Amino acid sequence: MSVMKKYRIFSLIASLFLLSVVVLCCTKTRLTRTTSNSPNIMDYLKNDSLNRFTKLVEVINRAEYATELNTYGTYTLFAPTDSAIDAYLKEQNLTSVESLTKEQWQNVLKFHLLEESLSSSTFTDGKLSAITDYGQYLITGIKNINGTSAYWINRQAVVTQANINVGNGIIHAIDHVLEPSVSTIAELLEKDTTYSIFTQAVKETGFYDTLNSIKDNTGSQVWLTILAERNQTYRDSGILNYAALKNKFSNTGNPKDASDSLHLYVAYHIIPDVKYLADIVTTNSQSTLAPLEVLTDKLVNDTVLINDDSYSTIDGTVYEPGLKMDLSSSDQSATNGVLHTVMGGLKIKVREPFPVYWDLCATQPELTRLSSVYRKQTFLFDYGDGNTFAGIKWEKSCLKYRAGVNGYLGDYWQVGMGRSSSNTDNLGTCSGNSWIEFTTPLLVKGKYKVWFCYYRQNSTTSSVQALFDSVPLTSALIQFDKKISSVDPSQEANLAAIGWKWWAGVNKKSGSTAARMLGVVDVKETGQHKIRFVLVSGANSDCNFDMVQFIPVDWPSQISPRFNPDGSIEY
Amino acid sequence: MRFINRYILFFSLLLIFSGCSKFFDKQPEDGIIRDDYWQTKEQVHAAVIGVYASLMGDPDDDDKNLDITLFKWGELRGDMLAASLGATSNDLEIMNMTTQTANSIVDWSPVYKIINLCNTVITYAPGVMDYDQTFTQEMLDGYIGEMKALRALMYFYLVRSFGDVPLKLDPTSNDDEIVQLAKSTQAVVLQQIVADLAAAEPITLTTYGDQATDKGRITRYTVEAIQADVDLWMENYTDAITACDKIINSKKFGLIANSSAWFTNLFRNGNSNESLFEIQFDQQKLNDFYSMFGVSSKEFIASNKVMDEIYTTEISDTTNAMDIRSAGAAVRAEDNVIWKYIGNNATSMIGSSDSYTHWFFYRYADVLLMKAEALAQISGRGQEALDLVNVIRSRAGAPASTQENPDVNSVDELSRYILDERAREFAFEGKRWYDVLRYAKKNNYENISYLQDFVGSLVPSNTVRLVKEKLLDHNSHYFPIYTYELETNKLLTQNSFYQ
């Protein structure tokens, strides 16, 4: 019996072994790639089957970079071919590679070398995402020659072979040696006489030195971006010379004074960072050297527009057409940043603050485009990847849009704060959230009272605090269970004095159509801001977020107008 | 000892079944049983049916199924998809026009696999006449016609996606046997496609006796539909009209009328009177679309443009409803879910085990719009073209907001209108990119700027100018050859744009 058992085990093992052998035999052969058997940069350059890099190898040896380029790393090397290096030598009136010193070649090579591996799929219309070892950015683009498109590096060299993957990084073969910019922004301005009026303003306001420095007081690299204006732009608006410009803008007569309007005017043309056009269009506002003044930008087809804004007032949308950037004379690299040309008179906008009666639903395009949902049916929006709405972020789970109710426009966001939301129309519930955040419409800088309008639904107590750009509003918490005790029109001034009002019109007003004055905010920068609502205590499954009103503190009325579920407004 | 024998026997059998399971497949895949095969007409029949079964996918490699390949090749570069949670970096590369050669979506092996199966039948079926006296010339011709047409269709996908491709017309015994074959130019491959279709058209049967088979196998009308499509691509407009007219005049097809059952009849059930050729997925062999569009980590949703601009949410005056092809057919408008392959009807979604909505190669609506496109290019026939577009639009109940009023004497206005209408009619049917490219490239790329603006509106804002410049190189309109192919077939040269 025990012998039998042994046999059984033996045969079991034998069969399993056989099985595994056969299974292995049936696997298809696939080519494998490992980093270990790829050559490193130096080996690749030396052994290139097309012999394109013999001169580059000489240069690297002369600069004593060979060891570095053959050690472990994640480099990107823009590798000039032999003809590129020959052309470079000829241009510099040099006879051979030996004519430059080790240090000189090191500087040349550093501008071709990055510490991060960047394949061509990361190339954009602007700068590379990593800086060269030389300390200046390279910009990328595409050049089309006779119907063939190739990557174009720094507007100097065309990539002849991209994405050569090697053990310690990636090589792009290029047909010209890349040369770093030698001029500062100030020098670029100075050189081009078509900017002379603007350049003189830069000098007279004292910004020339700022734009001419490469290191700041602490020794770190200065990066600036300037939006320069051409003389023609000034002439078109009747400003024939610097004197006329000064006459128009300078209010103190001393442009060096930081509060002088001409000083601010020039400061408004300078962005304190290195921003190529492609970088500018990825965010929609840019801070400037003018304190608290921002530029807005947008991309329309392939035109970059500056300060092309519309903002909504109670009387409708106001549109201010923007200024075009001149593509051909923009993206000029300097040692300390980049120079662009803006066409058509960029100046600081003077706007008075105006009230923003902000409906939290009607301003979300992801909702309003759903014509079968918006103002028609209650709907649960998936959390998705957290970007379901560009203008609303919340902690977790779904977000309930509630239609057919007594909010302004007949809707509101109904959020369970601290506990699950109620199961409206059997659609299901969303988990309790501890916060929700909205991006505001454009607010002109100034001081505002912030009113929060909700529809009181149930009596479970909960307290929610609002934070404007992360600063808590402290006049009042939102208690979604609290009604207005009396909606007596003769008492509205008294109520307003203690931070209460009703937001609905005369036929719809009730204790539940309540608005709370949360506090006063001082908006420092014209633009869009964030308001976040955070649960402080309690839990309420039906917190109805309807409107937020930003009303300038000195506005004639904090109470009027009022808003109805059918969309009408009573003044 | 009995135990040893029993175990060894059991496991030996097990390994034969599991290790190389294709042994029991009927079709001569991977050529294992070629020597014993090709003796009777039943075997030829089984082989041909096997080729159609292979259109449903590769049991070995779910990622490389033909439906995924055809969908992504036709839609990823179009304007109707948006990436969702499950989108891969490979998807995004192609959507952003930064395709690298190691991107497995450009692996063409699912298409060449079908071509190889067609080649096998075309090569070996004639020999069966020597063994089986009941196998007639007419029967043989029918099978050869089907296989040549299917091969032509597959090559047509390849030339539209890659431009120049290797033209392989002989069977290889094993899919993985490496064939050293250089590329042929797009023109040469198109020539072969035209020749194959011309040979197939007269000999392919017009019916196989029942409706379902007529939609799942290639009939003469399908050959003519492929001919029309190829003619449009090659700008042979009168030939395209001739081919479409043959189908129209057969009076065997019609448009499924606008009704509450329209979506279910046409798409969910399939095999309708409107259909010419479909991949007939079924409960035994599901398609890949539920996992792409139906699950919470879905790969794609519809872009906002689909409901905002392509269909709009306006109500038609005649049907008093939105365009029947829009919400509840192409998409679920509330959350942009791509509905065409996962809807049971306009409102309820199928379950994951019911993902067998067919893939539509050609529908009668396509025949009408292909004819319209050809007519639009010929002076004096613009009104006929517009009339056909209006037939399609009135069936769908298209609202006034998507109606354009092109000048019937303007080739370009008509062509643009037809292009827009095709987007509405064939949403997510794998045709969008080819339609846009065909429009852009005609007359020596007279509409290249349309293509630049089209693609420019789809890519990230910091690469718009770069991408527009890329598109000036016509090679960028075609995919690179997949790295694996380049490494195994040394005669291949990479598309110069990707070098």
Image (tube, coloured by chain):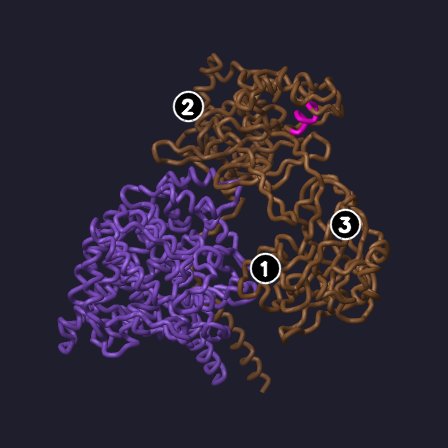
Colour purple, chain: B
Outermost residue toward the bottom in this view: A1
Q: Alpha carbon of mark 3 to alpha carbon of mark 2: how far? A: 75 Å
Q: Which residues are magenta?
A: A262-268
Residue A263 within the segment the image draws in magenta? yes
Q: Relative to B75, does residue B130 appear above or below in the rendering? A: below
Name the residue tied to disc 2.
Answer: A83
Q: Relative to A119, does residue A83 appear above or below in the rendering? A: above
Name the residue tied to disc 3.
Answer: A557
For the residue marked with disc 2, what is the amino acid?
Ser
Q: Nearer the viewer, residue B55 or A328?
A: A328
**Residue B497: where, in percent of width, then height?**
39, 40
User: What is the secondary structure assignment of the residue under circle 3?
Assistant: loop
* In this rendering, the label closer to the viewer, 1 or 3: 3
Residue A7 within the segment the image draws in magenta? no
For the residue marked with disc 1, what is the amino acid?
Leu
Image quadrant occupied by the N terminus of chain A: bottom right
Q: Are marks 2 and 1 on the same chain?
A: yes
Q: Alpha carbon of mark 1 to alpha carbon of mark 3: how far? A: 31 Å
Lower position in the chain sequence, tag 2 or tag 1: 2
